[in-house]
Image (spheres, rainbow, N blue to C red):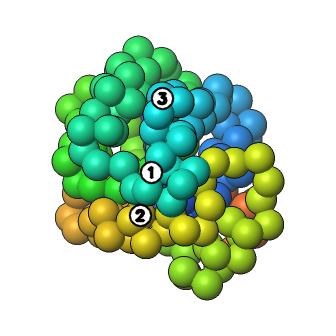
Amino acid sequence: MTIPEFIIIGGVAGCGKSTVGRLLADKLGYTFVDGDDYHSQENKAKMGQGIGLNDEDRAPWLQKLSEIASTSPRTVLGCSCLKKKYRDLFTASNPDLAIVILEVTTEHLVSRMAKRTGHYAKPNLLESQFRDFETPKDERNVFIVDGMETPEKIVGKIVKVVSK
């Protein structure tokens, strides 16, 4: 069983990217990188006000994260990867990586986000996240995983789907 050297955990805000990503990294002995840490203060402020980011806002952030994807083996990255062109940017920088999109219901997301503290993304950001999200269709090394189970079960599913 071979596991990709770089795995991205994606999905809309509140789907569990950081929680699942950290657990997966621990299980594999990888480093976890939270893409949220690389947003500019301006982007964090916009999202904190419920204003969704546009492609121009995201461009420098995505560029930095794609550099990490091309130079950081044995890493799990938490990054929304909302659009196909964003996922394509990552696969162009590292064709052997895997992208796992966590799928969660809107009701569950609102509940999760209302409970979390200290994070700039609030439930009012979800509308723009869903508007921008493009469901993967026949994309190489992109997998959709049910994000409604416990983080431990989700990690187990991820290991199965990304293993070659």
Name the side, left or right, on which 147 lies relative to 66. Answer: right
Instruction: Find disc 1 in the rendering and name its residue.
Output: 80
Q: Amino acid at mark 2?
A: Gln
Label of residue 14 in the image: none
- Residue 72 in percent (x, y) is at 48, 18
Q: Which residue occupies 64% across, 26% down? A: 31
Instruction: Find disc 3 in the rendering and name its residue.
Output: 40
Q: Amino acid at mark 1?
A: Ser
Q: Secondary structure at mark 2?
A: helix
Q: Is residue 42 above or below residue 101?
A: above
Q: Secondary structure at mark 3?
A: loop
Q: Count neighbours of disc 2 (C-alpha within 10 A) and say few if under 14, some if 14 to 19, many if 20 or more.
A: some
Q: Amino acid at mark 3?
A: Ser
- Residue 119 in percent (x, y) is at 69, 48
Of the pair 17 and 44, the residue shown nearer to us: 44
| Disc 2 to disc 1, C-alpha distance | 9 Å
Q: Is residue 22 above or below residue 124?
A: above
Q: Which residue occupies 43% across, 72% down? A: 127
Report which quarter residue 49 is drawn in: bottom right
Label of residue 129 in the image: 2
For marks 2 and 1, the one nearer the N-term is 1
